[in-house]
Image (cartoon, grey):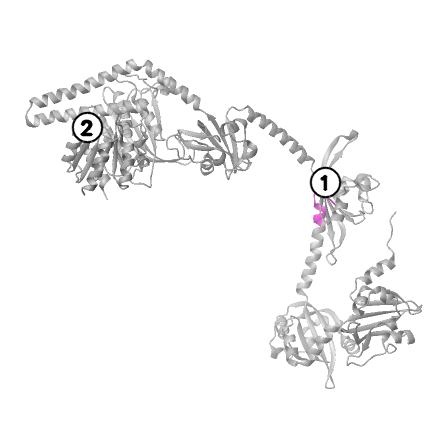
Amino acid sequence: MTVRPDPLDATQQALAELPDLVVISDPTGRLIYANPAAAEMIGVPVAELMAKDPRSFPIRLETLDGKLVPLEVFPLGRVLRDRQRVDREEYRLVRPDGTTLVISVSAAPFAGGGFMVSARDVSREKQAEEALRSSEEKYRMLVEASTDAIFLETTDFRILDCNSAALEMFGYSKGEMLRLTATDLIPPEDIPGLEGLSAEAFAAGGFRIEARNVRKDGSIFPVELNTRLFESGGQKFVIVFVRDLTEPKAAQATILERERFLADIFASIQDGISILDTELNILRVNPVMEKWYEHHLPLPGKKCFQAYHGADRACAVCPSIQAIRTGTAAMEISPKTGPGGIVTGWFDLYAFPIFDRGTGRIRGVIEYVRDVTARKLAEDALAAEKERLSVTLRSIGDGVITTDVEGRVILMNQVAEKLTGYRQEESLGRPLEQVFRIIHEFTREPVDSPVDQVIRTAGVAGLANHTLLVARDGTERAIADSGSPIRDRDSRIVGVVLVFRDVTQKRQAEEQMMKAEKLESLGILAGGIAHDFNNILTGILGNISLARLLPGDRAADRLVEAEKACQRARDLTQQLLTFSRGGMPVKTTASIGEIIAESARFALRGSRTSLELDLEPGLWPAEVDVGQISQVAQNLVINADQAMPAGGTIRVRARNFIRSAAGDDGPAVRPGNYVCFTVADEGEGIPPELLNKIFDPFFTTKEKGSGIGLTTSYSIVSKHDGYILVESAVGRGSKFSVFLPASPEKLPAWPRAEGKLERGSGRVLVMDDEEAIRELAALMLRELGYEPLAVESGEQALDQFRRARLEGRPFAAVILDLTVPGRMGGQETVARLREIDPAVKALVSSGYSTDPALSRYLDYGFAGFITKPYDVQTLGRTLRQLLSP
């Protein structure tokens, strides 16, 4: 049953909100009502007012000029005595605390007895009027400050004065305006409707209406006219206030349109909406709510729990009740059930309190209901999919890590946890580098994050060769991996998936297999090497023996040939070292074009095969071991020459190459800058079934050779973090392509100048345990202009170094043999020398290119290196570079 509100209660609630004093009495004069404004204006609580006779209120009334007014004269007395109505009489009210107010009082008797008195505080208005009368300047300032147009007119509406706002509003100058009448500012068609207002103005002292005015340019606009009649010096005048209603009218129209728009929105929202009062009565619902509960229509007027849930009372956890009690929104997921209690749907229910802007009190509740059945089903499907994904990831034998685009870990499988030593729970949100720590096997430097490579290239990226994963406990594992972008439906990259595996055992097995193959093939290799060295030694011994017998230039020619044979022996030795010991590169910044051209020409000496060189201008430098890359170029050219027994043309080409994205078509190399050189022949080609074996140790299809040339080349290029690829077709020849990482921003260390001696001066200390090398080094140094001193151990080198400094004849450079059996070698010696002189310039010399002291000589305190065997040109060039300022 709907309870209708009591009209008296509604009236009292309305009076309670008024800012004016209101008191009501019964026929005996006893107060039966006083509103809160009365208590505030008089300064006495309502309960105390209700207990007093109105004529005994603790107040004093005065006229505006300060004369005391008895209550009999006050409107209250006249209403009680004469039963006459009093309208808007002004008095000064002195309250119990001594404060005063200027009030405008109205009183009226009731037909059945009793009265009602209302009073308004007009203190501020009176103060404003007094201030306006006290100063013409203040009056003018106020008038000019007004945004409304203000006119001073005669009673026949001739314009006597106006403010600046009037001139701006109507578009006239001051002179033009003073020649007009008020009717000139009214559209002619509106004048008949305004006739008679002047009489009303004289009778009532003024009026307020909405009308239309016209500007000088003829445009018509809505206004509010507020007129006031006053008398000065025995003459009557009219003040007219004009307010432009263009914007308020537009705003009002906007508000109406907005209300209609909001109503349309309310009706078009796809979720259910209910508006309730604080008693949970439904006041309004949208069509969606009506559709959901069409069997309970009409919904307004019913309790929400009755209409929506068929309950007799609200549940204890009702979100709307919580919103009313706590002033905050509540949320609940409510299942929708069908016959037999089977869940058929889910709803999200939100409740928000509605506040009164004036009082801040809660006036009602908005319930917002969303059908989330589809979302719940999708979440269940997603959970099932995640479970399947989790099972799949646990079954994968490789480690899997996914990250967001910032490189923070999102997911890890169990293999990844085992390899990294981190659990998924503690890794979530951490940067990948903290969990997946990878370094280069030889340099020990951190490797670039594969996530950064994938994001930068937007394609698949793999790790560089010789990458180690350092686990949480410090365990190092050789790994191979690939990173791929994770894309959303719009193909935007939202993350990266990294798949990696432990290849440590595989590498160890491969190394063991290679060792076994080497042992198995040692006999073949020994025979081939012995054959090659016997040929070389024959050339050396034969030419030297002839040189001893021949005079002059003929002897010199033989010695030149013996030197060439020695160089071939050196190259063969380096090739064997690289193949058998791993030959770590000793890198310098070099011009690849010069190395390739020189090596190709040298390899084809005496051959009937022609060479065609095509070197792109401006080739980038690269960080390489000059000797090893020269060996690669020579091996590839010799291989091409042997593929054409009847002769032909070998085409050697070099160019700069940029790989932007790993997913693009092109060579299978990582993104980056490369110098690429190719060696192509016109031979018979390689059968497809043999292509994948050409880099295997000792594999060869030629009658001559040991089968280690391509294997050595592959090893060298791999240690330079490069790639060597082959293309071949039977009957059309073969082409080998070598990609070496380029350093475009660097310059070659120094140009190679063959045949020219780089001379110098100064004392040079040589330490080597081989007497023949000491004597030969001393002879070379004298020929180059230096003053040598040779010793056989590190202890002797330290002694001579100290003595030279004491004598004032210090050594300009020191050449130290790296390995001295049973004595102090070069590594310990240079450390002791740096204690004596931190600026010592020392070269490390060794025939073992595998020692890290050559590849990272700066880390061990050396200023440079020179590998054995070396000739006088190499020694001169190395010393000149070392001693250059």
Which comes before the other along the chain, label 2 or label 1? 1
Q: Nearer the viewer, residue 471 or 74?
A: 471
Residue 21 position, x and y percent, is 81, 68
**Front tag of 2 and 1:** 2
Instruction: Find the magenta span and give its range.
Output: 264-273
Near mark 2 (Cα within 10 A), the count class, few <14, some 14-19 or many ≥20, is some
Q: Is residue 521 above or below residue 153?
A: above
> Could you tell me how many numbered marks the image carries?
2
Decide if residue 409 is on the left or right side of residue 783: right
Decide if residue 292 is on the left or right side of residue 170: right
SS of the residue at dot 1?
Answer: strand
Q: Nearer the viewer, residue 510 or 772?
A: 772
**Figure quadrant of residue 255:** bottom right
Residue 603 position, x and y percent, is 23, 26
As drawn, the label of residue 25 is none
Q: Is residue 726 above or below residue 590?
A: above
- Mark 2 lies on residue: 773
Q: Is residue 266 magenta?
A: yes
Residue 170 position, x and y percent, is 63, 72
**Figure quadrant of residue 470:** top left
Amino acid residing under circle 1: Glu
